Amino acid sequence: MSEHHEVDSVSGRSTTGHEWDGIKELNTPLPRWWILTFYATILWAIGYWVVYPAWPLVTGYTTGLFHYSTRASVADELANLETLRGEKMKVLGSTSLAEIEKDPALLSLARARGRTVFGDNCAPCHGSGGAGAKGFPNLNDDDWLWGGSLDQIMQTIQFGARSGHAKAHEGQMLAFGRDAILKKDEIATVANYVRSLSGLSTAPGFDSAAGKKIFAENCVSCHGEEGEGNQEFGAPNLTDKIWLYGSDEATLVETVTNGRAGVMPAWNGRLDPVTIKALTVFVHSLGGGK
């Protein structure tokens, strides 16, 4: 690297004296507009530090001259929105569920409010369209563990299932294998019998009479003699070909062996009563409500 400064013959500019592989570095100053812009950004940053929250402190942060907060701004916007909705939401709160569905204006309001709340709170489990997933019920069909009427849906939303709330649904599928109630071969037999109730194929050599006997002695009290289910216990209908966890033999064996005890959270207290009412109407309107 040469320390000799010279004037470049092509550009007419002096060099810095730095040279790499025959390439000489020109001593070209930055454009004045770039320098001024750079200084302007420094001044802007200083001003930003002064007027907006910026600097962390030991137990907090500087609030700035404007005392601006995005959280407070959002809270104000939501408060303004609730003020605009106020009268309509009061009407919604004082109207029965059945009457809301008969009134086009109230139904539209409830569905709009319910759709937003559903997306924020229910979609992670039930899907954005309520189609459900393995272990999470489809809210679009007419198959309900705890009932699909407006009042039943509202009851479920308010208090949940196995949520710990005193008014929650509490039915539970027993662990017949884990608790040594049934043997492995009996579990396989009754799993195949359950498959046969909805017209599914069974394993070679399946003994239907033995399966029916095991079912009658252990399952009828919840699922009914024909396997049609019982909403009082949250026992699913085993004849309608709608399966919450799956219908293959291995899944049914797993269900009978270890039981099922899915949890639906209680939204009472988390959501206000009017919002729960709107959410109830929205879920009912998805297509599967009775």
Image: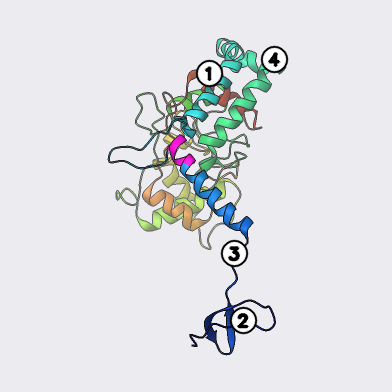
Rendered-image quadrant of the C terminus: top right
Q: Nearer the viewer, mark 1 or mark 2?
A: 2
Q: Nearer the viewer, mark 2 or mark 4?
A: 2
Say which residue label 3 marks: 30
Q: Amino acid at mark 1?
A: Val
Whichever of callouts 2 and 4 sits on the residue coming sooner in the sequence is: 2
Query: From where the camera sits, is residue 245 visible?
Result: no
Q: How many tags in the picture?
A: 4
Alpha carbon separation for disc pair 1 and 2: 81 Å
Residue at the image point whose x is 56% and y is 90% from the top: 21
Q: Does the segment drawn in magenta span residue 205?
A: no
Q: Secondary structure at mark 1?
A: helix
Tag of residue 103: 4
**Residue contact between numbered discs 1 and 2, judged by CB atoms under 8 Å:** no
Alpha carbon separation for disc pair 2 and 4: 87 Å
Residue at the image point whose x is 58% and y is 44% from the top: 242
Tag of residue 229: none
Whichever of callouts 1 and 4 sits on the residue coming sooner in the sequence is: 4
Say which residue label 1 marks: 274
Q: Amino acid at mark 2?
A: Val
Tag of residue 7: 2
> Callout 1: 10 Å neighbours few (<14), some, many (20+)?
some
Majority secondary structure in the magenta region: helix
